[in-house]
Amino acid sequence: MIVGQGIAAVLAAAGLLVTAIPAAHADTATTPASSEVTPGTETETPSLVTGLNEEAAASGTAADAARGHLKARKGRYHIAATSAKDLASAGTTTEKGGKETVRLQQKYKGVEVLGGQYLVRMTKKDGKRTVTGTSGNYFTEIELDTVKPKVSEKTAIERAIGAVSSQLGGGLLKAPAKGEKPGKVQLSGTAGAVTVLPQGTGVLTRHITVTGTNPADGSPVQQEVYIDAHSGFPVMQYSGIQTFGATGTATGATDAAAAPAGDASTDAADQLVVKGSGVRYNGDKVDVNLYKDSKGLLQMIDYSKRPADSPYEGPMIATYDARGREAGSASGVWPTGVKYFQPETPELGKDYTDSGAVDAHWAAGKVYDYYKNHFDRNSLDDKDGYIYSLVGVVSNGQPYNNAFWDGTKMVYGQGGGDYRTFSADTDVVGHEMTHGVVTHTANLVYAGQSGAMNEAIADYFGNAIDLEANGQSMDDPDAGLLGEDLCTTLSPRECALRDLNDGATTAKNFIGVTYRGDNGGVHLNSTIFSGSLWDMRQDLGAEFADQIVYRALSAYMTPLDGFTEGRAAVIAAAKELGATKAQLKIVTRSFDAHGIVPGWEKALGVDTDLIQGKVNIYNTGVGAGGGKYAVSNSNEEGSEPYSVWLGNTSGKGTPQLVSSNNGDYNVYADTDGKTVVWAQYGSSGVRIMARPVKGGLAKQVDAIGTDVSGLVVDGDYVAYTAFNPQFGVTNVRYVNMKTGEIGLVDGGRPYNVSGLPSIKDGKIAYAKVAPDANGNYTLGVEVFDGATGVRTTMPVVDSTKTLSVGQTAITDDGVFWIEDNDATDTGQTEVRRANVDGTNPVTVAPESSDSPMYAYSLTASDDAVTVTSLPPATSWGNETLPKLYQMAPDGKGGAQRVSCNRGDQVYATADEGQRVLWLDGTTGYTNLVKRDRPAGRC
């Protein structure tokens, strides 16, 4: 995963793991000497040009003038195609002083390029237009033979749902609820536009939006998945939902459905603005604007922002009663039958206080006023768009302690425990509504560094609005806290979810994570950037700082910007707004203090040995055995379909290419030191391939038309998990490469589920879910003997009470597996072992409150068991990311940390002795690393 500048930073965190190429040198021959040019990365087009004073066409639209400017100066911008088809208008923002900012969306042969936006800034005065600067991402290296997908929409949707299901399923197999069958589909996919991912010469994809409900906790799901249009492999996915807190597992939407019909229908008999009042959670009595329709019904709709001479046109603020509605039904869609809050009198009672309706409605008006009064912005979209708030959603019938923006509306969860409803704090409302402003300006992609900047700007303005609305000073020690008023008993500092004065820096606090962890660290790393902005606000003064940040957002930033580009945008905006040298020093010092300086990514250290750096792959893992490893990789730009590489686990020697490189994706590789196996994704399906380590031709050993994962090999046998679309479940499939025999280890009985296989000496261990004699589904672990066809059940503690079982491993010591028997569902699990015939069961690592481990996956050699621990993420932090622990096969001596690296430690694979390899995200890249023994305590 890359966390460097621009596109690399975002696509890396989202799952398409890439490396940056050196920045091209911008051609400044035609650029005035007074201007400043910042070269682009992965493109010949400069990322930032300031100080221009060049005339543009005064007639026609601003977009036409912007395109004309770029066309006339090809030597500077290197943008060959400047027609409206190639540079589509993505909107024009006008601000005080005749300022115009045009956003142009790059298209390649009519297909949109993800994040390819270029901005042209102009002023229009006295009938003349003048270009003052440009910025953004325009990718000059894209060159595709065709933009016609080989993979159908239907196949792409199936692959996308499979990819999201795998992510939600995680590393543990769970039994269905009583009375239900496995494989209950809770996800659906919608095909969006064909899209070019701007890696190298480009990757053509089908964009699929997968929506539904997470079966584990009822939280909303909306994943943006990009399927390679030629092979059908999911090359990237991330969650689009933009939440206030990093609590829970909510994932969600960026493009919500329209509101229920009839929202704006008013007539002369209606009373558009009724003055009402209510009491906020904090006890303050406030005025609220209501609406009375022709039938005399009051509704929580505020039409007061409309001009007096045009009362039936303009913005509307509406607050809906969503109490008891599932969050999943409100993400990207509207809950069926949801209605506005409808008070009986203008004086809102206690129910409206306790529900969070008063706070949500009042605060939405304050946010509107802030953006109107400070920046002359007309609603979130700057086009008098309606503002919707849904208040009181739940998750699986339980409190939903979060809030989110889904692309067109705010959704506030019903609090539980010590939390009030999440509209209770003005900075939460300001935060979510600012996500709406970001959507309609820079539209920062909600993953990786751009996602962290999205969060940072929402935090910055959310807090600024909170302070203004509640009369709080920047000098208040709690001024930098967010969410501090959400709790019923905790103090503000104990309750706050984030603190803009936490002093976070890139060197000490940046955490490299993939999309799995907080969408690439959008909350984890946000206060590094927001802290810089907040420091600037404290030292420059609130009004000037707010103007600078807003101008940077609306006129400089583009969707794929990272921290370094964000710094440049803010500095450029400060210069444009007339900052003095002393003030500019304050701006740069604010970023320097938080470590946001060019090249900051290189300062992050590790305690591991590097095997391969910048492994440009998405979610395909690594395999090892017999002193060899097998891993997928791409080219330096990340645009080439994945190939399988074989190397020595010692790190010595040069890795060798073992798969073909013909446009298919070669993934999920494993090796036992003698044979390499992998899955080859192509437009016609998936082929299971094998090749001897010593050399020779690769051969197909199996073929299947559905998604696969978890390939393992030992001797003559290959096993892997395959999705069964008929029943919506997974089954472990095996191949005897010597005889050609192919089968299912669990017999393929309907609604049997199996997965998480391991293999040794012709015996395959796997986790399973199967019905008992009474039709109730139970969990367990079995071993299938390929030679005899006999299945042996491993002795779990109690198959009728076991909550989940996890990854298996077979060694000379027996069969290992993960098991959860704790009905309190703390998230802790135990590691168990038995002989392959099921005798001599022992608990290697018990479930214990004294244990730091939350076993999620495991891998084992004859000398050590390595467990991936993944604590439940009640909040995101380094301590809740996946970490590796190692112990002896008998568990004696306890578990030790394998590495003290900060960041994700995933896809661990055991070799020989205590040596273990894994994919590590600490440095901001995804690196294949190893350790030969545990680090001990961290």
Image: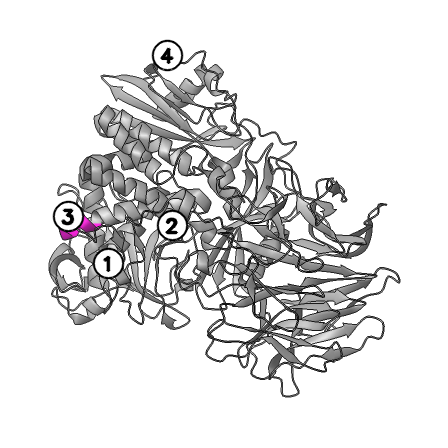
Give SS at disc 2: loop
Q: Which of marks 1 and 4 precedes in the sequence?
A: 4
Q: Nearer the viewer, mark 4 or mark 3?
A: 3
> Residues at badges 3 and 1 in contact (C-beta under 8 Å)?
no
Q: Which mark is residue 199?
A: none
Q: Which residue is mark 3?
A: 473
Q: CA distance from mark 4 to mark 1?
A: 50 Å
Q: Which residue is mark 1?
A: 425
The amino acid type of the residue labelled 4 equals Ala
Q: Which residue is mark 2?
A: 407
The span shown in magenta is: 466-474
Q: Which residue is mark 4?
A: 33
The amino acid type of the residue labelled 1 equals Asp
Q: Residue at x 23, y 61 (%)?
A: 492
Q: How many marks?
A: 4
Q: Residue at x 43, y 20 (%)?
A: 70
